[in-house]
Image: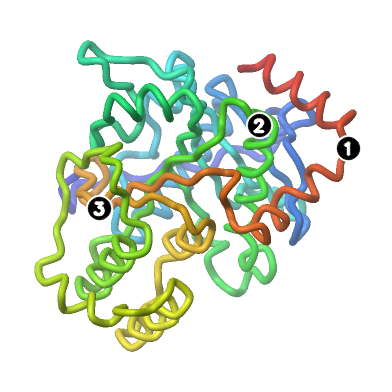
Amino acid sequence: MYLYGTMKPIIAPIEREALLSELNEKTLLRKTNRAGNELYVVGPEAMNVIREIGRLREIAFRNDGGGTGRELDIDKFDTDPAYGYKQLVLWDPDAREIIGGYRFCLCDQAVFDRTGQPILTSSHMFEFSKRFLEDYLPYTLELGRSFIQVEYQSSKAGSKSLYALDNLFDGIAAIGILYKQRAKYFFGKATIYRGYPTEAREMIMVFLKKYFGEHRRLIHIRKEVKVENPQRYTKLFSGLDFKEGYKVLKAEITKMGVFIPPLVNTYMNLSPTMDYFGTGINDEFGDVYDSGLLINFEEMYPEKRERHADSFMALGWQHLRKLIRRFQKRG
């Protein structure tokens, strides 16, 4: 965590030609379904792209009240290949700009500490049960550090902005297909920043627990945040199915002058069987509120699978086999 007022100046933008030397046909994953953008996957060797991602992430996270306070948001998981992390990069070929991205890891590559816990980007927040380590981790894709750069968060960017998060899920679906046996689940954190109204955050937490509450005790949150008076919100959703409850949640949140955070909203509409593990304080990232979520790729709503995966599958198995060989060769 950083102290406000001690934030360092952010580095200058990386030259576009340096980015294009690393975002090339060898690292291209796919074109997006909408808005004419492109998705790439790079590892720690692509240091120009890594530094630009770190720059844009820090700007975006500071803008929302989080961030690291450093010159750029980069850590050992970005730069050390031993941890197995890569970057999913969303690129605007017209403006030659990085729009956003995700950091991810195929967890069968995870490094373990002396206590038998995996060293993941989320390990400081979560303790993983023996059952999770044995039955889920080897088949899990961990996602984190999702961001959309500030210039593309405005409606002025048109379709490039409107479909940015949707584009990223085109990439996640493609990764799930290419690494099907190693990525049956994806595990990630959905962030709510500290400036978000407490009442709205607590209402979302109660909603997530009601409709996605996880009872298998797979993951424990180290610094869990509790809702002070859950009954206050529980009655709002009493007797309602998910769709009815979701309408009530949206309406109540809107009354407070805010919206459901985009990533939280996206996750809760991906799968009826999503597991919610609770919400905790991320003390390594501006003390934001992060919720742990696990989704089975095969149990996503059919319309979501079709939206993000079908166009990729339509490329044909000959093309997909080439991609599989290329990306699996790189790890």
| In this picture, residue 101 sits left or right of residue 121 | right
Say which of 316 and 23 sits in front: 316
Q: Which-is-in-front pick, marks 3 and 2?
A: 3
Q: CA distance from mark 3 to mark 2?
A: 39 Å
**Badge 2 is on which residue?**
18
* Residue 18 spot, x, y in % from top left: 66, 31
Please say if the residues under marks 1 and 3 sit with CB atoms less than 8 Å apart.
no
Is mark 2 in CB contact (under 8 Å) with mark 1? no
Q: Earlier in the sequence, mark 3 or mark 2?
A: 2
Q: Which mark is residue 151?
A: none
Give the answer, above or below, for where 96 lies relative to 113.
below
Mark 1 Cα-neighbour bin, 10 Å: few <14, some 14–19, many ≥20: few
> Which amino acid, mark 1?
Gly
- Eyeballing the image, is 319 above or below 147? above
Residue, disc 1: 316
Instruction: Mark 2: give few (<14), some (14-19) or many (20+) Cα within 10 Å.
Output: few
Q: Hey, what amino acid is under mark 3? A: Thr
Task: Tell me the kind of residue under disc 2.
Answer: Ala
Q: Position of residue 224 (x, y in %)?
A: 16, 49
Relative to 47, does residue 269 appear above or below in the rendering?
A: below
Farthest residue toward the bottom? 255
User: In the image, what residue occupies the spot 40% across and 71% down?
Assistant: 260
